[in-house]
Image: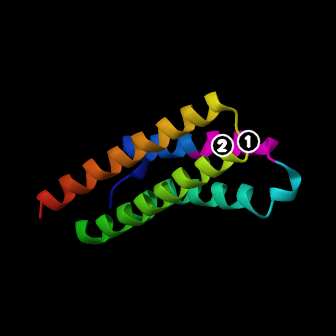
Amino acid sequence: MKDFRQLKVWEKSHLLALAIYKETKVFPKEELYGLTSQIRRASMSIPTNIAEGCGRNTDKEFARFLQIAMGSASETEYQLILARDLEFLPKQTYEKLHNDVEEVKRMLASFLKTLRADR
């Protein structure tokens, strides 16, 4: 069992989720159960799946949870685009969050490649 808190990718994805929670506080109230809820759940799912994967017994199982985290990162990436296009996020905020989610995706891809190479 690994300590997920020691992983840079978990730390970066946790910070991304915190930033998204903060930025979505100003989304329109009618989006509370729509985009606000969706983007929060997707962003939170990234570090959640990394943490859950760390609790698994094998690298194969861990890799499966990293794949799920990657899917959630892609979902978050699209929802950021939607929020930008709906003008819920200022351009500068969107760019920062978008860069952060892209970095998390690169880190996940690299981690997955390393896990698979070790097998």
The dot on residue 87 is 1
Res. 6 visible in picture: no
Marks 1 & 2, CB-CB < 8 Å contact = yes
Q: Is residue 50 highlighted in magenta?
A: no
Specify the quadrant of the image occupied by residue 55.
bottom left
- Image height of 42 relative to 81, above or below: below
Q: Is residue 34 visible?
A: yes
Residue at horizontal 62%, vertical 28%?
A: 92
Which residues are the magenta region? 17-27
As rendered, which of 71 and 89 lies closer to the eye?
89
From this view, report whether residue 64 is shown above or below residue 36.
below
The local crowd at label 1, few if under 14, some if 14 to 19, many if 20 or more residues have their Cα within 10 Å, is: few
Left or right, 64 with reference to 96: left
Residue closest to the far front:
85
Image x and y of residue 73, in percent? 48, 54
Cα distance between the residues tagged 1 and 2: 5 Å
User: What is the three-letter code of the residue carrying label 2?
Assistant: Arg
In the image, residue 94 lies at what x, y percent?
A: 61, 36
The residue under the point 38% across, 40% down is 8
Q: Quadrant of the C terminus?
A: bottom left
Q: 116 or 82, which is in the foreground?
A: 82
The quadrant the N terminus occupies is bottom left
Residue wearing tag 2 = 84
Relative height, residue 58 to residue 110 (above, below):
below
* Residue 23 covered by magenta stretch: yes
Residue drawn at the location 26% of the way across and 56% of the way down: 112
When asked about the image quadrant of residue 89, the answer is top right
